[in-house]
Image (cartoon, rainbow, N blue to C red):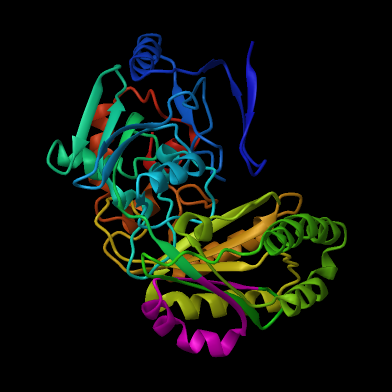
Amino acid sequence: MSQSWTNWGRNEHAAVDRLHRPERASQVAEIVGTAHKEQRKVKVVGSGHSFTGIAAPAQDQLRLDALTGIVAVDDTRRRVRVRAGTTLRDLNPLLWDLGLAMPNLGDIDAQTIAGAISTGTHGTGAGLQGLAAAVCGLTLVTADGTEVRCSAEEDPGLFQAARVGLGALGVLTEVELQLVPAYRLRAVERPAELMPFLESVQEVADTDRHVEFYWFPHTERVLTKRNTVVDALHPGRPLPRWREELDDHLLSNVVFEGINRLVAWRPSLAPRVNQVSARALSAREFTDRSYRVFCTRRTVRFTESEYAVPRAALVPALLELKAWIEANDEFLPFPVEVRFAAADDIWLSTAYERDTAYLAVHQYHRMDNRRYFAAFEAIARSHSGRPHWGKLHTLGAAELDESYPRFGEFVDVRNRLDPDRVFTNAYLDRVLGP
C-alpha cells in the first residue's frame, strides 16, 4: 500500500510505494542494490525542509532517522564523522560537549546533516562559507549498491561534486566535518531605517562576523542582526527565559501565525500590519553558545525562494524588488531576508567563485506566492542570481549550466555514478537533465 509524503512547507506532495528505514550503512547498500536490479527509483528524505521537490520520492523512499550519531572523533585535527541522518538540532549540543562547533550555521536546525549540505545550506558571514565547506570527507552508496568514500585526496572529483550533490549521486551515509573550537557569540539585534542602513551595509558585513537583516515590505524599516565572537572565557549572558519565550515563541510564532491568518483572510491589511510590526521591534543583546544564537524556532509555515547574487548587486536588486512591490498590489506579511557568504570552490555551491549576498522572499503557506516569486526571480536573474537548490525557482538545466562553470563536470560525475538514474525524480530531471 502506498503512503503519502508532504514536505514541511506543505507545497510538495508525493506517493511512496515503499518506505525504508535502514539502521546501518550495509542495509542502505542492500536496499539501493535491490532497487537498481528491479529498476526502481530511490530518494532519500531528511526533514523535508526543502521547498523544491528535490527529495520527493518517485517510488521508494529512504529515511535515515535511524542512522544517526557521531561515529568517530579526531581531537588533534578537530574532525568528527557523523552518520548522515543526524539532525543539526541533535548534532550541535553533541559537538559542544566535545569542545567543538560548526564554523557557521543557518537559522533553522531541523535539517539532517546530509540534507543540509546536499542542498547548499548556508548561514551568514561575509568571511565565511556555507555548511558544505566544512565537509572534509564523505561516504556514499552509489546506484549499484557500492559504498564509496571520497575526500580532497581520495577521488577529489567526486568529492567536489558530492559536497553539494543534490541527492543525485548516491545516498550519503557518513559525513566527516572539519570543526572549530566551541565559541560563544554576542548577538546585537536592532531596528533601523532601510535606506541609511543600505548605505553602510557592505561595510557592516565586513566588520562583524555574522550579519543579516530583514526588511519589512510596505515599510522603510529593517531588523538588523549582528553577531561577534566573544572571548573563550566569557561565561555567556543568555536571554532571560521570559524574554526568550516572549520574543521567540509568543511574538515570532504564535502572534505571527495569527497575523498571517489575518492577512490571508484580508490581504489588503498587510501594509498596516507590517507598519505596526516593524514599529514594535525592540533592540536586544545577549551572549550564548554559537548554535543557540544562530538557530531559531519556526512554527509558522511558509514557502520560500532564495537567490544568491554577487555582493555588489545586493542593494540594486533589493531596491528593484522594493519598487516592484510598491507598484503592484502584492500584499506581503513576511519580511525579506538578506545574508552574506564568502566565495568557495564547490561546484554547485551558490557561492562558487564569488562573494555572495542572499536575498530570500517568503509567503505564508495559505497564500499564493506565484506572482511575487516570479517577479523576484526575474529581478535576481537580471543580476546573475543563482537559486538555492532547496528553495522555489523555475530554472532548468540549460539556464543552470550557464550559471555554474563546473555544471557539465557535475553532470559527467552523475552519468558515471548513476547512468540508470536510480536517484532521479522530476525536480532533478529538470535541473540536471534526464
How many numbered discs? 0
For residue 311, above or below residue 174: below
Q: Does residue 23 appear to the left or right of 6 in the view shown?
A: left
Residue depicted at x 56% and y 67%: 337
Residue depicted at x 54% and y 55%: 295
Q: Position of residue 291 (x, y in %)?
A: 48, 55
Residue depicted at x 66% and y 55%: 370
For residue 30, above or below residue 99: above
For residue 87, above or below residue 404: above
Q: Quadrant of residue 343?
A: bottom left
Q: Between 25 and 338, which is closer to the camera in this rendering?
A: 25
Q: Does residue 80 appear to the left or right of 274 in the view shown?
A: left
Q: Does residue 47 appear to the left or right of 372 in the view shown?
A: left
Q: Position of residue 204 (x, y in %)?
A: 43, 82
Residue depicted at x 33% and y 22%: 420
Q: Is residue 274 visible?
A: yes
Q: Does residue 36 appear to the left or right of 107 in the view shown?
A: left
In the displayed image of the protein, which residue is found farthest to the left? 153
- Looking at the rendered image, the quarter that the C terminus falls into is top left
- Looking at the rendered image, the quarter that the N terminus falls into is top right
Magenta span: 187-215
Q: Position of residue 252 (x, y in %)?
A: 71, 60
Q: Is residue 410 visible?
A: no
The answer to if 204 sits in the magenta stretch is: yes
For residue 76, above or below residue 364: above
The answer to if 93 sits in the magenta stretch is: no
Q: Position of residue 432 (x, y in %)?
A: 37, 41
